[in-house]
Amino acid sequence: MNAMNAMMANLSPLLASISVQDRLWFGDESFTQAGSQSDWMFHFIWWCSVVSFVGLMGLMVWFSLKWRRREGKAAPSSPHHNTALEITWTIIPTIFFFVMFFEGFRGYINMSYAPVGSIECNLTAQRWQWSLEYPGGQVSSEFATETEGARATDIKQYFSDQDSPIWYFPAGQPVLLRMTSTDVIHSFWVPDFRMKYDVFPNRYTSYTFTPEPLDDTARVMQDEELGAYQYRDHTVFCAEYCGDYHSEMAAIIRVVPQEIYEAKLEIFGSPRGTLAERGQLVAMQNGCFACHSVNGDGNTGPTWKDLYNNEHQYTDGSTVLADDNHIREAIYEPAAKIRAGYPNQMVSYQGNISTEQLGWIIAYMKTLSEATPEAERAAAEVDPDAEGGEGEAADGEGESTEGTPSGG
């Protein structure tokens, strides 16, 4: 094993550093330690296959020409056994197969088991959104469409029409994602990391990665609060077909310096803006706009446009006024009443968000409806943290509980 490790140490820099190969096969180099190891294995197996194929085909052509049957000359008898040759072509390939197995297994372990001290995050998949919770319970309040000049925004213009969350992680620090799904099977795929892990309902799968340190190739972000800092974006896709908007289920992993990561977590832990703005953010974080439009357009769920304080027809023949209590029920018990013309496919959000956050969502829905009384609309536009905002914000929000938006 020592000799094998020495051989791998000598070959690894040669194969893994060939950026031409990386760009040919993957479009770019890998940006994690496990990804670099995966690239090395791919190149190693590729060149073993190329050399074996070319060598065997060359020998086959040479043998065919050299020992071809000639007119007037009897064919020599064919040898049926050569111990030295058989041992050679058994042992040499076996050595390469052992290298492939042990190095491949080591790479798998490195992607499956996190080092001590890793940043442990909970990642939840649902149709059609990824949600990530940091160790302190924070949830990102930034989305790809808000990022000026980022590679993430460039990618989103081609792959998705809906907003995708941006997750911040520190460069050089190991991260452990504990992943589960609330509905169907999804697949967490980060092309830049050379990995794809299935995400299942009712069980956990895990993936660990260590982002490469930032270098001169990293981009520079100008932030009003934090100033200029380096970053590198990596796009997350779903690689398991999960329904209508499967192709738009994306997110952004943004690798930044440690101090920026800590500053972002502090910002994410402090809600900002008016009640309606906070409600819009919570809805985005929980993937509500993947099913519900806010402009009246049709979707897999009812539009939020003019939903609040209007009556709607349901499959049991009843007509219900969409007030605060009804919206609360639709979020926590979506199967209790099904809107006419829509399937019973929404999952319950009971326990996913706090009571306060549900109040924000209701406040946001009030701003989208022309039937909302003027006093309630004004209360929804109050910033609780602004001077004089405290107290006013409570108007019209008394029925809030915990959850996320629903079919209404």
Image (cartoon, grey):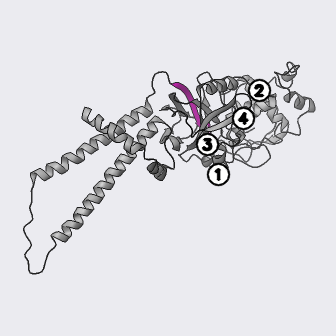
Amino acid on which the number 1 mark rests in the picture? Tyr
Q: Residue 239 at x, y = what percent?
A: 53, 46
Q: Position of residue 224 (x, y in %)?
A: 74, 31
Q: Nearer the viewer, residue 136 or 12?
A: 12
Residue 66, image x, y percentages? 17, 69
The residue under label 1 is 158
Q: Position of residue 145 (x, y in %)?
A: 70, 42
Check disc 4 and report its element: helix, strand or loop.
helix
Please identify the quarter of the rendering in which residue 364 is found. top right
Badge 2 amino acid:
Arg
> What span is colored magenta in the figure?
115-130
Q: Tell me which label, 1 or 3, sits earlier in the chain.
A: 1
Q: Quadrant of residue 285?
A: top right
Q: Earlier in the sequence, mark 3 or mark 4?
A: 3
Which comes before the other along the chain, label 2 or label 1?
A: 1
Relative to residue 202, is residue 137 drawn left or right?
right
Q: Is residue 125 magenta?
A: yes
The residue that disc 3 covers is 250
- Identity, as a three-letter code, of the amino acid under mark 3: Ala
- Please say if the residues under marks 1 and 3 sit with CB atoms less than 8 Å apart: no
Q: Are marks 2 and 4 in contact (CB under 8 Å)?
A: no
- Asked whether 404 or 269 is in front, the reply is 269
Mark 4 = which residue?
283
Task: Look at the picture and state if 5 lies above or below 90.
Answer: above
Label 3–label 4 contact, CB within 8 A: no
Residue farthest to the bottom, as pictured: 72
Q: What residue is shown with label 2?
A: 272
User: Between marks 2 and 1, how big is the CA–CA gap?
Assistant: 30 Å
Cα gap from disc 2 to disc 3, whole angstroms: 25 Å
